Image (cartoon, helix red, strand yellow):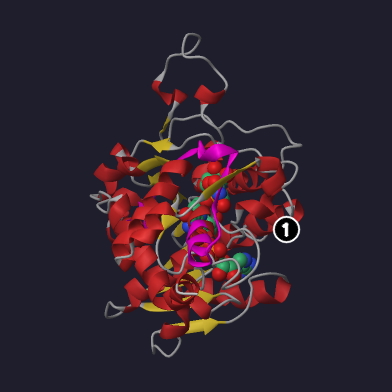
Amino acid sequence: MNILVPGCGGFIGSHFVERMLARDGVTIVGWDAETSKISHLLDHPRLVLRQRLLKGPSAYEAFAADVENCDWLVNLAAICNPSQYNTEPLRTIYANFIDGYPIVELASQYKKPLIHYSTSEVYGRTLASYVSSEVYAAEDLYLMDAERTPMVMGPIQNQRWTYATAKQLLERLIYAYHKESGLDFAVIRPFNFFGPRMDYLPGIEGEGKPRVLAMFIAAVLQGRPMLLVDGGRAKRTITSIHDAIDALVAVIERREQSLNHFYNIGNPANEVSMRELAQAVRSAFARVTGEPRFLDHPTLDVDARAFYGDGYEDCDRRILDISAEQARLAWTPKRSLEQLLDETVGYYWQKYGERSRLRATG
Ligand code: NAD
Ligand code: UDP
């Protein structure tokens, strides 16, 4: 089996490529300019790496030949860092819609099944954040069902939604190609995947504002308070990267049942507020290191506008229905929040714990 993977060098890509190369008979043709997360796989004889971005006419010509030769196309290429959606809206729209357009077109032209990574952000905010339950009492006030729930975004000036709307339009394009040209697809909407190799640790591995767990872990390792945006009241359902990859593998293995559907991939059992997540990170550090000092690690409340700039608007809550996903994929997420935090904190502690130890001992 030959799998073509744009965005193979990212967080999800690195875990997917690792998992698939462990199987006999699988070849991965990966496209990405960034390869540090797959550096341990670069010498593998069944990984063919095109170390470049999929952008512009010459890249698409070379990419078309790879599409022609593949059995599956798994598209992971994106810009998906919330701090960029309102500060670099044009880059966000181009990367998540314009650059994705030819991938969809080529999958349709060569009749290859496309597994496309979208986002749980396509739902926007919950209906419950706008409408009182006295006016509208249906379950989808909170619950996100992949093939039923409406999508609710804020106004255009709130540029936080550039990412979600670009992703949503690409989903609609895929569905249109399916209906009009017979493209086979699966669209996956991830719900906050966490694990080793996620994002980058700010102040250690790069500069900026990555997603929340990388922010929290970097803060603890560097002896800074964990920042709670608007008091950390937003809620998310957290998913282990390994459960997420199990779902992706199931889409490939069960193609008769899996194709031509939209999937919520997440773990409804792991819902936490960001304040609770900070507490869970403190506990994970204490368990992993055996050092109780981490239980008192401070947090600091910050205003969303001061932290992200103008045009940021938060998703209040993302609680998902996965009953259809469980039935079609014979898949259930298994890892608890505690387990996945221990694994992730353990990974970063092994890499960077010495710095924290030196700071603590003066
Ligand atoms: P990531 O940022 O770690 O990986 C994305 C990769 O795509 C990067 O390595 C980047 O260099 C590459 N890329 C960007 N543009 C490219 C191009 N034109 N050609 C080739 N490569 C390109 O992100 P991730 O967490 O691995 O996410 C993968 C997909 O899942 C994305 O579509 C993202 O929107 C979606 N997603 C992920 C999460 C999550 O929890 N990780 C949540 C929601 C959505
Ligand atoms: N957040 C936070 N502190 C941080 C970074 C993020 O409290 O240092 C909050 C953010 O405002 C949001 C939640 O954590 O409510 C999740 O943010 P993330 O960037 O991980 O991505 P999202 O789930 O919003 O796509």
Residue 208 % position (x, y): 65, 62
Which quadrant of the structure image shows residue 96? bottom right
Out of 77 and 147, give the one closest to the viewer.
Answer: 77
Say whether residue 220 is magenta.
Answer: yes
Residue 179 in sight? no
Q: Does the magenta run of residues contain 236?
A: yes
Residue at screen point 43% across, 25% down: 140
202 to 250, vertically: above or below: below
Residue 346 position (above or below residue 50): above
Q: Horizontal placement of 346 versus 67: left or right?
A: left
Taking the image as drawn, is residue 121 in sight?
yes
Disc 1 marks which amino acid?
Arg
SS class, disc 1? helix
Q: Nearer the viewer, residue 285 or 80?
A: 285
Is the CB of the residue bearing disc 1 within 8 angstroms of ligand 1?
no
Ligand 1 found in image quarter = bottom right
Q: Residue furthest front?
A: 362
Q: Is residue 191 above or below residue 128?
A: below
Identify the residue under disc 1: 91
Q: Quadrant of residue 251?
A: bottom left
The N terminus, quarter of image:
bottom left
Q: Viewed as shown, does residue 73 lie left or right of 26?
A: right
> In x, y percent, where is residue 36?
52, 79
The magenta region covers: 216-243
